[in-house]
């Protein structure tokens, strides 16, 4: 069990109409929060303002799923950190594996996106994770370290204060295959050791590291029992109010 304030975050991905998003956030505001965790949901852009409005006065905070690296300009279809913030986001995911693999976000692009989010005071949830091939080749820790090193390049500890990291093994996302609690703990501990080395032990101790990849109401308790697991980033099950409520209220 973590000594840090846990975070349970839901990534709604490209799901939900406005009406569905409104119904889901309304249900979640009544979910309770027995562990006093920080609760975050990341709706799609079209629902962001509506969800932020309906979450107002509750404990739920709202995140964008990504932001562009510029504040404005000729970038058809992109959403800037200024716009995400204006719509009510306090956080943003950066570097989700679907952004990396489907949309081609490189470490260099992600680094610029982190800069843009920080410039506008959005709390960054920076996602890292290895593919199955990389895990089987014994490269998990070096891949994660390189994603952190390059994605967070040139920021000081002071600038990164409040940063949240999400460890999401690519082979566990949306596959129903979850990392075992020991596999998650091993990588989380390695990430914390990297943060201590790259920044400071105090920064490493304070940074929340979330696990993501097929987190369910049935496995959240054992994952959250690990000392370096500070929360969960949940995809599929965050779309079902009762399931996500159970995950928020893990045992
Ligand atoms: P999943 O997605 O819970 O559906 O595996 C997690 C994520 O992509 O953040």
Image (cartoon, helix red, strand yellow):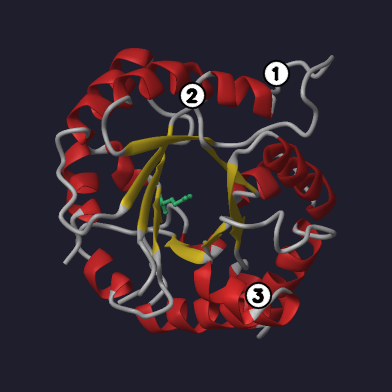
- Residue at disc 3, CB closer than 8 Å to ligand 1: no
The percent position of residue 21, horizontal first and vertical second, equals 33, 23
**Residue underneath mark 1:** 77
Question: Quick one: 50 or 75, which is closer to the camera?
Answer: 50
Secondary structure, mark 1, is: loop
Secondary structure, mark 2, is: loop
Q: Would you call the spot at circle 3 few (<14 residues within 10 Å), some (14-19), or many (20 or more)?
A: many
C-alpha span from label 2 to label 3: 30 Å
Q: Is residue 94 toward the left or the right of residue 113 in the image?
A: left
Q: Is residue 204 toward the left or the right of residue 8 in the image?
A: right
**Residue underneath mark 2:** 88
- Residue 231 seen by the camera: yes
Residue at the location (25% across, 28% down)? Answer: 24
Residue at the location (66% across, 85% down)? Answer: 138
- Residue at disc 1, CB closer than 8 Å to ligand 1: no
**Residue underneath mark 3:** 195
Secondary structure, mark 3, is: helix
Vertical placement of 6 versus 67: above or below? below
Residue at the location (36% across, 62% down)? Answer: 5
Q: Would you call the spot at circle 2 few (<14 residues within 10 Å), some (14-19), or many (20 or more)?
A: many
Q: Quadrant of residue 212?
A: bottom left
Q: Is residue 24 toward the left or the right of residue 176 in the image?
A: left
Q: Quadrant of residue 177?
A: bottom left
Nearest to N terminus: mark 2 or mark 1 = 1
- Residue 79 seen by the camera: no
């Amino acid at each position: 069990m973590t000594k840090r304030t846990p975070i349970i975050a839901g990534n709604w991905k490209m799901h939900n109409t406005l009406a569905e998003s409104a119904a889901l956030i309304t249900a979640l505001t009544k979910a309770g929060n027995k562990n006093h965790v920080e609760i975050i949901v990341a709706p799609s852009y079209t629902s962001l303002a509506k969800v932020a409005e309906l979450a107002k006065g509750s404990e739920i905070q709202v995140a964008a799923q990504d932001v562009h690296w510029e504040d404005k300009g000729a970038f058809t279809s992109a959403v800037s950190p200024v716009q995400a913030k204006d719509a009510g986001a306090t956080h943003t995911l950066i570097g989700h594996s679907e952004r990396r693999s489907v949309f081609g976000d490189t470490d260099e692009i992600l680094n610029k996106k982190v800069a843009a989010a920080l410039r506008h005071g959005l709390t960054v949830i920076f996602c890292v994770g290895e593919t199955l091939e990389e895990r089987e080749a014994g490269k998990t820790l070096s891949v994660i370290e390189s994603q952190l090193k390059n994605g967070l390049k040139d920021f000081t500890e002071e600038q990164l204060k409040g940063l949240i990291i999400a460890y999401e093994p690519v082979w566990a996302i949306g596959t129903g295959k979850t990392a075992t609690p020991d596999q998650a703990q091993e990588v989380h501990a390695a990430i914390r050791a990297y943060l201590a080395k790259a920044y400071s032990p105090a920064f490493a101790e304070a940074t929340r590291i979330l696990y993501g990849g097929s987190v369910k109401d049935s496995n959240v308790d054992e994952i959250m029992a690990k000392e370096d697991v500070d929360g969960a980033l949940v995809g599929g099950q965050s779309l079902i109010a009762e399931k996500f409520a159970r995950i928020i209220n893990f045992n």
